[in-house]
Amino acid sequence: MHEEYYGFSDKPFSLTPDPKYLYKSETHASAFDLLQYAIRRREGFVVVTGDIGTGKTTLCRAILEQLDRKTFTALVLNPFLSEEDLLRLILQDFGVVSREEMKRGRLAGVTKQELIDTLNEFLLSLLPLGAGALLIIDEAQNLPRQVLEQIRILSNLETNREKLLQIVLVGQLNLKELLRSPELRQLDQRVSIRYELRPLTREETAAYIAHRLTIAGGSVVSFAPKALELVHKYTGGVPRLINLLCDRALLGGYSARTQRITPEIVTAAATGLDLVATRRSIVGWVKRHAPAFAAGAALTAMLASAVTYAVTTLQARATAGKPAAHVVVQAPPAERDTTPPVTGMKGTSGPAIPVAEDSQPANDSRQLTQPAPASRAPSYSILVGSFRYEPEAALLIGQLSELGYRTPSARVSSSAHGTWHQVLIGPYNELELAKQDQSRVRQLPGYADAQLVTQ
């Protein structure tokens, strides 16, 4: 019907998790890169969460398509399994037993321990080949607790140097709460990487629709800008809802024999699907902008305090008949990008930490008269790595924290280098202590480029 009318070679807004339609928004691209990174480094447990319809399964299938032949994979889509059934399914996906053998009941009378031993022997046989194994479990929030405990036991399959099985748990947002329960504390402590998929922004929603239309071969149909805005309002940026709404809108456009999807067509399609336009509540908006509010409030309070103090000082000195000292009080200068890039862990690079903003220009127009403030003693930090994606920085922070280091992070933006996430150790009040820890960190594998910075 409307696919033929618009000249599509495929359904552009199908609900099936086809990896060729994966649109790498900021959050999906970060998750994709992070999963590839974790699989290459064999990080053990990885947990990816997201709301219903945010593209978790599509992401998993896209990851599987990118793996090389040396990575054996098992994808579990049905979480309602017993411990023995899970082990049998894993062995089947890895190719240890065939589907026909499973149907004939080859493993029917095998005990759970025998299944684990068989899996362990298979994983050990991959080591001489330089191969690895990956297990992805979708809808993991529905796994029974005893099965989750069995998965924890599988994570113990390892040598003295590395994990034999990389495990990725993918589930809805309540998976995080499930893993935090006291009885699953041992499993939760084994998670090395966590990432949450977020819905698409308004701009990403428009790009997502254009991406799927292009992949499907549609060149004659288009969405009006206002129609795209309505799609985002009705779906909240959730990919599955976007697919539903856009497919219904294309059907409405076909019925009207038009190649231009208008806001009216989108509204009619949303009404037919019982979708309601999302309204941003004041409380939600404030929560999203809380960091900006906090920073603005702190700056306002600081400037107000400076003004009050300056005025009080002026009045006191005027009463005493003494001239006031001329001192400049101003907002922090705009961020400058004058420092060269530095190299972080494993060859990642990014802009160096900005120089501390203690110096002030002499010709700023915002001037008040007050006594000069006491100079602040410098503090020192160790810059360990700079990353394009925040999850990679979070991974390094976790690794350094396990070694006992205090690891704050910084987000640095510049016109020349873009936005980078930097991982630091510190701060230190004494330069000698900072140098001692810098020397220790540089001796660790992968951290030889750690640099000392002054803040």
Image (cartoon, rainbow, N blue to C red):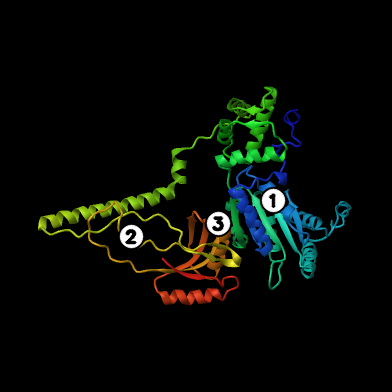
Q: Look at discs 2 and 1 and give the one toward the viewer.
A: 2
Q: Which mark is residue 88?
A: none
The reply to whether dot 3 and dot 2 touch (C-beta < 8 Å) is no
SS at circle 1: helix
Q: Look at discs 3 and 2 and give the one toward the viewer.
A: 2
User: How busy is the neighbourhood of tag 1: few (under 14 within 10 Å), some, or many (20 plus)?
Assistant: many
Relative to 307, residue 437 above or below: below
The residue where tag 2 is placed is 360
Relative to 254, residue 330 above or below: below
The residue where tag 1 is placed is 60
Q: Mark 2 and mark 1: span between their CA atoms?
A: 51 Å
Q: Amino acid at mark 3?
A: Glu
In primary-sequence order, the first of circles 3 and 2 is 2
In primary-sequence order, the first of circles 1 and 3 is 1
Q: Amino acid at mark 1?
A: Cys
Residue at position x 55%, y 32% from top?
277
The reply to whether dot 1 and dot 3 touch (C-beta < 8 Å) is no
Residue at position x 63%, y 57% from top?
34
The residue where tag 3 is placed is 390
SS at circle 3: helix
Q: Is residue 129 left or right of residue 47?
A: right
Is residue 127 visible in the rendered image? The answer is yes
Q: Quadrant of residue 394?
A: bottom right
